[in-house]
Every structure is written in C-alpha cells, then in structure tokens.
Image: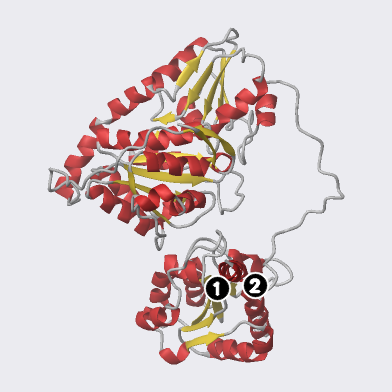
Amino acid sequence: MAKQLLLGDEAIAQGALDAGLSGVYAYPGTPSTEITEYIQQSKQAAEGHIHSIWAGNEKTAMESAIGMSYAGKRAMVCMKHVGLNVAADPFMNSAITGANGGLVVLVADDPSMHSSQDEQDSRYYAKFALIPCFEPSNQQEAYDMAYDAFDYSEKYHTPVLLRVTTRLAHSRSAVERRAPRPQNEIHLDPNPKQFILLPANARQHYKKLLGKQDSFIHDSETSKYNKYIDGTDRSMGIIASGIAYNYLMENFVGTTCPYPVLKISQYPLPTALIAKMVDECGQVLVAEEGYPLIEDQIRGVLNRTGNIRGRMDGALPRDGELNPNLMAKALGMPDTQGMPIPELVVPRPPALCNGCPHIDSYNALNEAMKDYGKGKVFADIGCYTLGALPPYNAIYSTVDMGASITMAKGAVDAGLTPAVAVIGDSTFTHSGMTSLLDAIYENTPITVLILDNSTTGMTGGQDSHALGRLGNICKGLGVEEEHIRIIKPLKNQHDINVAIIKEEIEYQGVSVVIPTRECIQTLNRRMKAKAKAKAE
C-alpha cells in the first residue's frame, strides 16, 4: 500500500485500525492524545463504527477496553505514563484475567517532563504485571507493532503494553501500511470463569501467566524487532532500546558502527542475546530512554566486573531525554552539540491565553484570600496550573489529578485554615468527585473552586464529561445547594465574585464555587467554524 507521512502517534492509530480495532478508550494526556484524535477523525474508523469517545479517566478507559476484549473484539486503551498510575488496578488485574479479543495498552512516556509531573518509565509496569512489552524505535515500527500486538495478545490471551516516548510520538516519518483486516465477531471466552477473579480462580490464572514467561522470552530472542548486529571492535558492545537505537545510529550516517549492537524493542529481555554481548565484549554501554531498566537487570546486585556502563554510572545522564550528541559523548566521539541559543532570543514562560476565564477567577480569588496569608490554596493538573506563575502566584500545590481537594482537606485536618482547592471541570470528573465526597462525609470546612471552561483545555479542547452537569453532580454528592455558587469570571463581575468567594471561605463546611465561562480557544474555534458554515 502507499506510504503515508505520520506522527508516531498517528502510525500507532493507523496500525490499530488496520489490525481490526473495534474500540479505542482514552483520557487525553500529552503525548498520547493524538492517537485517539486520529481515530476520531478517521473515515475508516467512522465506516467501521469504531468506538472512540473519550473516557472519564484512565481507569474507566482501561475497564471499558477489558470489557470489549471480554466480548471478543480488539480494543486499545491509550494514556500517558502518569495515567497508567490511575489505571493500575484494572491494568494489573488484566494480566491475571488475560485477554479474549486482542487488548493493547498504549502508554506514552515523557522523558524530560515536557508536560508531566515525573519521568516514570512504563516498561516497569509491564515487568511488574509479567506481560509482553513492545517499544518501537521509529514510526514504521510503531505502526507494525500496533498491528502485530493484537495478534500477539490473542495468541497468548494476554494484554500487551506498547510503550512510546514523546520524541517518537510527536515526530513524523513515512509509514507503509499493511492490508486492513476485518474486525472480530463477538465471541465469549469458552471458560466462563476467565474474568472472575475470586481467589481460587485468580490463583489458577496466575499460574497460567507464570507458565507463559518462557514463551515470552523465547519470542523476544527470535523477534524481528530485536536484532544482534555484529561489529569488528569488541572492546565495547552497545545495547540500545527503542528510540535510543535511532540516536545511536545517527552518529554513523554514511558509515558503519564498529561495535556490536543489540537493538531491543520487545520485552521481556532477550537474555541469550544479552549474554552473548556481555561474554564477547570488553564493556557494554546501555542506551535506553527513561529509567535504566535494562542496565539495572544486567548489572544485578553485585556488578563485580564493572564493565556495564549507562545511566547508572554517569556515562549517560540519569535524567532527561537522550539525543545523538549524548550518545556520541558516551562513545568517546567528538561533541556535536550546536551553538548555544543567542541571548537575543528571550525565554518566554508559558502563560494563560489572552481572554482566558481563569485570569478573572484567579484575580478574584487572590483578592478574596489576601487577608488570610499565603500557602492556603491547593491546585490541580490543567492549564490553570499556570496560576502558580507571575503575575498571579495564586496556588501552592500541583501533585496529581484530583489532589487539590484532598490536600486541602488534609491541610484543614492538620489545623491549617482556611483552605481552598482549585480544580478544572474535566479534572473534577476525572478524579475530583471522590475527593469531594471525602470532604462532604466529614463536612470538612474547605472551599472548592471548580473552574468550568467547558472543555479539557490543556490537551487541545476535548469534550468535558462535566459539561452542564457540575452543579447537579456536587448536589448529588451531598454539597448543600445554597453553598453551590455559580459565578461568571469577567472583569465587570469582579467585586461580586470576590464577595461570593469570601462568603464561602467563611462558611464552616464544604462549599463549592463554580466560575463558568467557555475556554477562549474553543470559543474562537467554534465561532470560526460557524462563520465558515454560514459562508458555505
């Protein structure tokens, strides 16, 4: 078939579609968002009636994907690395239930924390769950692995983790497609107890999972994605996984790497291939994007030989992304780092958009809180996190999705009052509702500002599950109706908004203030679409 120029994310989406996907489940999170968006905009997906509506959070997405697999159809669940923390409960248990229809868990890690709270490496989750993991080194492999992973999942009746990183997810290359295959028909697992994890059943399933490990290792040893490339200079061997293999080979364009190279893109680790390299080479340099998972396993506990190099001994940086220059330095090659950016290019920190409703919300909140001292406003994950920066300096925490409310509750439990939580509408339905329920159950005196801009703003304006429902949700959870206050964050409403926020801060119970105004970006997009439709 003809080649297409695709982002790594788009290649994964297209690979899944061509593999007979019936549903993708996801919560938007950079750098994984474009996978679901590509499927949502795909004519092929529309014609196949493929499910692609955003889920409320990663846990519900994972559970829905397991449900589709239960019915015998192929499902993919997509998230960023911290999203897998949210989905960890069903993810780990899916390794025990196994899969019926192919089940692929796509996780996009974010080395260097371009848009994340940490650098965690999702390969550890695959190792933890004892399931296979694929890690593409380029966009063609991203497509091929997405296509192949469903077959592999159904062959062993196991979920498969597909791990990418930011640089691969958001760069483009030509990708050659394969012939699309039809979607599976509905068929249930012949074992009626397969998905019932009562302890007696789970123990049997776990033994089956353990029994598959030798097959997984054998497949890694013989995988087309793992290859041993011999070299003439065995003073050093190089193990490179995923995109780190590309960074390595960029240093040998037009020439041949003199050292033996073991490319790893399928896990569990191909132990025989690794042993071959360790036995034949004087030293071994391990290049991997993320944590030193491979290096750590090769070193073992003692590492008496001292011939394993990588992130753990400083040959490569312990944090951040790798790149071709870092690989060159580790190989003793000339430093190819370019010239520093001239000082005339002034660094510009991120900022809330002009016209953003959060600006007026923060201005009102700051004035309402000015007599109470600093350090008493807890916030959450979203574009409103920028309220931590000047000129607002309005918030003092950002830990994880939903933490603002429960951190405020914990602070009050400790005696710090008053305490205010700031959370977005999408984050609230993702993880904030259970946090609010804890506060309601104890009637903890906190004030929660749910900044309702009618969208999931930070990841591009996806639909919010909270649209038009926030007041009713809070009432249903148990917040007293008279302490659910909806305000309009506008300059001409500033004094009114300050007064309302102050009233609710003084209230000795749970109160919710909902500043409601549409995101300026989605408003502009909607108005342009409306004008275009009118012109046509």
Q: Residue at x 43, y 50 (%)?
A: 43
- Three-letter code for the amino acid on which mark 2 is drawn: Cys
Q: Secondary structure at mark 2?
A: loop
Residue 314 sits in quarter = top right
Q: CA distance from mark 2 to mark 1?
A: 9 Å
Percent coordinates x, y for residue 406 in the rendering: 46, 70
Q: Establish if 164 lies above or below 328.
A: below
- Three-letter code for the amino acid on which mark 1 is drawn: Asn
Looking at the image, can residue 300 be seen?
no
- Residue 356 disc label: 2
Say whether marks 2 and 1 touch (CB < 8 Å): yes
Badge 1 is on which residue?
A: 453
Residue 236 sits in quarter = top right
Q: Establish if 323 lies above or below 16.
A: above
Q: Secondary structure at mark 1?
A: loop
Residue that extends furthest to the top in the rendered view of this protein = 232
Question: Dot 1 surroundings within 10 Å: few (below 14), some, or many (20 or more)?
Answer: many
Residue 128 vs residue 253, the one in the foreground: 253
Q: Earlier in the sequence, mark 2 or mark 1?
A: 2
Figure colour scheme: secondary structure
Percent coordinates x, y for residue 484 in the rendering: 47, 86
